[in-house]
Image (cartoon, rainbow, N blue to C red):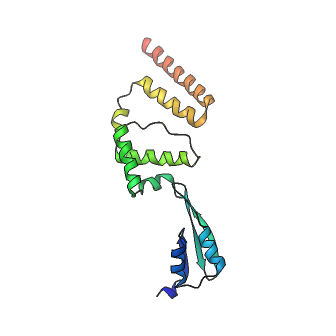
């Protein structure tokens, strides 16, 4: 049955597993070296090799960080989520979202995320706290110029609302 396989897709593997494959498929030295060259960087990417009659290729799989976080079933991944749940008082889903943001930070594609706030506490913030949080996020994402513009817009809206109440 294994001799009928047309495509072999092999993620990073040790020499012993490559020799196991060689029992079912004749591999050249170059193919074995290609398979040994595949690397894995935890929470970033996993490389693999595709072997077919007319193709030999090394590929890199980079799953979206949120998907990677939600799919985390290893003991250390569950422990990390549980620690965030206890530390911040958040749900498992909120912890998984935070882990996804941390993975983006580890990948150097996003700034370090702010500590998560439980959903039930988000609604209890004062308007000033909500504005401050919104401006801090805006500053982290778009910089000081965007914050200055937002502050001016917010103050204009507040002044207009006060003038409307006084009239």
Seen in the picture, residue 11 relative to 67 is either above or below; the reply is below
| Residue 153 picture location, percent across and down | 55, 25
Furthest toward the top, the residue is 166
Q: Residue furthest right?
A: 30
Left/right placement of residue 122 relative to residue 30 reads: left
- Eyeballing the image, is 97 above or below 129? below
> Farthest residue toward the front?
16
Q: Is residue 118 visible?
A: no
Question: In the image, is 148 to the left or to the right of 127?
Answer: right
Residue 66 percent across, percent down from the top left: 47, 52
Report the residue at 48% width, 36% height from top. 114
Quadrant containing the C terminus is: top left
Q: With respect to residue 109, does 8 lie above or below?
A: below
Could you tell me which residue is drawn at 44 percent across and 28 percent down? 130
Task: State the residue in front, 137 or 81.
Answer: 81
The quarter holding residue 140 reads top right
Of residue 5 and residue 124, the one placed in the foreground of this image is 5
Front one among 105 and 133? 105
Q: How many marks?
A: 0
The image quarter in which residue 120 lies: top left
């Amino acid at each position: 049955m294994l001799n009928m396989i047309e495509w072999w897709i092999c993620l990073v593997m040790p020499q012993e597993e490559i020799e196991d494959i060689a029992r079912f498929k004749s591999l050249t030295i170059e193919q074995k070296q290609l398979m040994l060259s595949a690397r894995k960087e935890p929470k970033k990417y996993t490389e693999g090799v595709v072997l077919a009659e007319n193709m030999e290729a090394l590929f890199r799989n980079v799953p979206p960080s949120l998907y990677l976080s939600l799919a985390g079933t290893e003991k250390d991944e569950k422990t990390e989520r549980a620690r965030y749940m206890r530390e911040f008082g958040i749900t498992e889903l909120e912890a998984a979202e935070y882990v996804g943001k941390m993975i983006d930070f580890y990948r150097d594609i996003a700034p370090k995320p702010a500590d998560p706030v439980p959903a039930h506490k988000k609604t209890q913030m004062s308007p000033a706290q909500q504005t401050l949080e919104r401006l801090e996020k805006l500053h982290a994402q778009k910089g000081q110029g965007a914050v200055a513009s937002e502050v001016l817009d917010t103050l204009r809206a507040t002044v207009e609302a006060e003038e409307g109440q006084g009239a």
